[in-house]
Every structure is written in C-alpha cells, then in structure tokens.
Image (cartoon, rainbow, N blue to C red):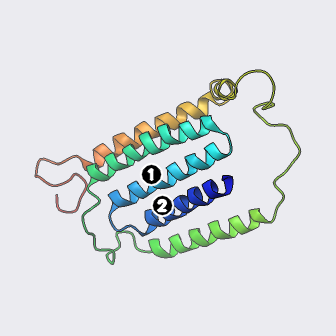
Amino acid sequence: MDWVVFVVAAAACLAGALGVVLASHPVHSALMLVMTLFGVAVLFVAQEAHFLAAVQVIVYAGAIVVLFLFVIMLLGVDRTENVRAERLPGQRPIAYLAGAGVIAGIFLLARTAWVSGAESVAGVADGPGSNVEKVARSLFTRYLLAFEMTSVLLVIAVVGAVVLARHSPSGGVHGSEES
C-alpha cells in the first residue's frame, strides 16, 4: 500500500509540476501548483512527517498560492504581450549564461559528498518533547531573524505588486507604456 500511495502522490507531483510550466493561463498554472503542493503533502504523510504535511497544506497550498493568485489578478498578467519586443537589449544572452551557470553549479554540487558527519546546527532531533515543540523552539530562537525577514519580504512583494498595478489618473496602469 505504501508503494501505491507513493506512486499516486509522485504522479500528482509530476503532473502538477508539468502543468505549472506548460499551462498557458497563469491561473491554471497556479492551480497546478496547488496540485503539486498537495502531492508533496501526501508524501510527507507517507513519511510520517505530519507537521510538515500540515504546514505544506496550510502555508504553501493555502496562503502562498492565494498570494500568487492575488498578484496574478492584480497585475492582470493574463493579457497578451509581444514577446519579440525586448525592453532590455541583451537580456536573453545574459539569461542563457545565467541558466548555464546554474546548471553547471548543480552538476558541480552533485559530484560532492553531502554527508559531513557534523552535528546539526539546530541541535539533536531526538529526545524528550514533541516534534512540533522542537521545530517551534528552533524557529523562534535560533532562526527568528530569518523567519521575520521572510515575512518582511512577503509584505514587500505584496506592496510592490499593489504599486505596480495601481491605476494612474490618465486611466492606464502606472508604469506601463500607455500612460
């Protein structure tokens, strides 16, 4: 039964990931992302990581995808664009070089050994207390700054989307070429 659950969840993850990339409409792409995240949550449940599965559904499939949909609807990315007209000349070669660099870095890192034998930075994972308590203690002590910086970045992203999408007095979208 474990094998069947894994195969079904992995197929949902792969189909959702392909749907994210291949969907022509951005809202459909966001819905495919939800399917991928639910498949990952099922895989977490299969590994008995129930807290991570709940966080996956509540935070990612719930809040983050809703934020994506909000930005998609706010910015109106469903409009057609002329992809042949480049605003920044030379951006495609730079993007190709950056992509090749990332792929080369992945292959370089794949050749190295990841197991170091060193103790975890956050401490030992076993011992007294529940898993949720250990995650909370680590999150709100050692990693509090990173946790708060992530929330600040999300707020900045929403404010930036609102600023980009606000309408100018002339009736066009602020920052677009028509206004």
Instruction: Residue at 46%, 54% (x, y): give it.
Output: 35
Say the numbered circle drawn on residue 34: 1
Left or right relative to 160: residue 168: left
Give the residue pinned by disc 2.
16
Q: Does 138 sit left or right of 70 as displayed?
A: right
Residue 159 coordinates in the image, percent (x, y): 35, 40
Give coordinates of residue 82: x percent, y percent. 28, 74
Q: Quadrant of the C terminus?
A: bottom left
Q: Earlier in the sequence, mark 2 or mark 1?
A: 2
62 relative position to 74: left or right: right
Q: Pick the residue in front: 171 or 120.
A: 120
- Residue drawn at (73%, 21%) of the image: 129
Residue type beneath disc 2: Gly
Residue 53 x/y as whole percent? 58, 40
**At 16% across and 48% down in the image, what residue appears?**
168
Q: Please determine whether, in this image, residue 80 is positioned above or below residue 125.
A: below
For badge 1, the amino acid type reads Val
Can you say whether 106 is above or below 33 in the image? below
Mark 2 touching mark 1, by CB under 8 A?
Answer: yes
Q: How many marks?
A: 2
| Secondary-structure class at tag 1 | helix
Q: Are there few (<14), some (14-19), or many (20+) residues within 10 Å of tag 2?
A: many
Instruction: Please name the residue shown 63% across and 56% down the image.
Output: 6
Which circle marks residue 19 in the picture?
A: none
Q: Position of residue 54 (x, y in %)?
A: 54, 37
Q: Residue furthest left?
A: 170
